[in-house]
Image: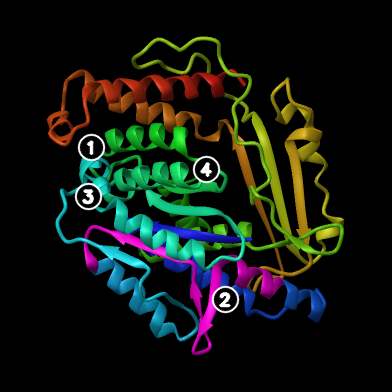
Amino acid sequence: MSIVTVQLGQCGNQIGFEVFDALYSDSHCPQGLCSKRENEVYQASCKERFFSEEENGVPIARAVLVDMEPKVINQTLSKAAQSGRWKYGQHSCFCQKQGSGNNWAYGYSVHGPRHEESIMNLIQKEVEKCDCLSGFFIIMSMAGGTGSGLGAFVTQNLQDHYSNSLKMNQIIWPYGTGEVIVQNYNSILTLSHLYRSSDALLVHENDAVHKICAKLMNIKQISFTDINQVLAHQLGSVFQPTYSMEGSYHYRRNPLGIDWQVRPPLSGLPTLGKVSLNRELHFNTSIANLVILRGKDVHSADLGGFKDPALYTSWLAPVNAFNVWKTQRAFSKYEKSAALVSNSQFLLKPLDTIVGKAWNMFASKAYIHQYTKFGIEEEDFLDSFTLLEQVVASYCNL
């Protein structure tokens, strides 16, 4: 079961490189506590999942690189080739010099349709190299222009052309202090479009990862490379194969095996506009939790706390909401590691904050002209606000 990765924009391409590098490094690390045979199966599973056949002894990443400018793509291709360990395919990139800054509308309404055929052809070529396609992993930012607008457009196209394959988007939540003046507009437009076309969103907050670098890793001068390597480590530990009780490495169609839907749906839409959270959240209620344990002592780990009904919404039993995967095959150079993937109220406040800030700008018509000139109407903003306010209300009512 192979996955085709689509790297979009500067953020997506830089993170994508670190993800493939982490996957390759892990698969070629000593096997730790598992047997030689088990390690060989692990390595073969990883290779089939993320790399195609070797060229001159070097595996090729199953990836398509997309950006409006060639600089980042060229740098990414070069870094992979210089590593001598793995590389990107020669025809797996697309670049175009002209652009319109950080405008979501340009990426979605102009750049996407203009180059739709070229991008989809590149993706199809990668798909044809797969014996069995599991789905697509789309890496993108949601605050900038290319990664957000073009990412939403490409994901929608993937849904149209590959409706039976999983579409999982990994999105970078912008710094709360702000990177781009219109980042909140870009964010709500991205999230509302992905809500309709993606099967799952994996979210990483820049502020949270920055804090990991500063407080846990004691990095004094934090760079984007530092942040991206933390992201890649987390993603790699989740996406590498896990050992099933039946004695074989496995993936599912949904590689994380958790429920991504907020149920039951609300009967009506909430009032449009800025709606503050109607109660202070003192507890993080979950719909689903997946714990992945690797390395030493995995089978003796006490996970009873995750089976507490208090963790979950009242209409969902822990047996249906909690899953655990274990393997003695360590991840990378670590003796033991644990990863938690959770669908919960964790992002409720950040989402409510972004929707609120975007609404305040929209109410004063700030920067709206930058979007309408590329075909995004005020009605499109209103649809995005309505949908995301409903998501906020649904998570509030867990």
Mark 4 to mark 3: distance in Å? 22 Å
- Amino acid, disc 3: Arg
Q: Residue placed at 62% from the left, 23% from the top?
A: 263
Q: Is residue 43 within the magenta segment?
A: yes
Identify whether 133 is placed above or below 201.
below
Q: Residue placed at 43% from the left, 68% from the top?
A: 17
**Whether residue 227 can be seen here:** no
Residue at label 4?
163
Closer to us: 155 or 190: 155
Q: Is residue 189 within the magenta segment?
A: no
Q: Is residue 337 left or right of residue 394?
A: right
Residue at label 3?
114
Q: Is residue 264 left or right of residue 169?
A: right
4 or 2: tag closer to the N-terminus: 2
Figure quadrant of residue 14:
bottom left
Q: Secondary structure at mark 3?
A: helix
Q: Residue placed at 55% from the left, 35% from the top?
A: 346
- Amino acid, disc 4: Ser
Q: Quadrant of the C terminus?
A: top right
3 or 1: tag closer to the N-terminus: 3
**Whether residue 395 can be seen here:** yes
Q: Which residues are magenta?
A: 42-70
1 or 2: tag closer to the N-terminus: 2
Q: In the image, residue 204 lies at what x, y percent?
A: 47, 47
Q: Which numbered dot is residue 381?
A: none
Q: Are marks 3 and 2 in contact (CB under 8 Å)?
A: no
Residue at label 1?
182
Q: Residues within 10 Å of mark 4 (few under 14, many from 20)?
A: few
Q: Secondary structure at mark 1?
A: loop
Q: In the image, residue 203 lies at what x, y percent?
A: 49, 44
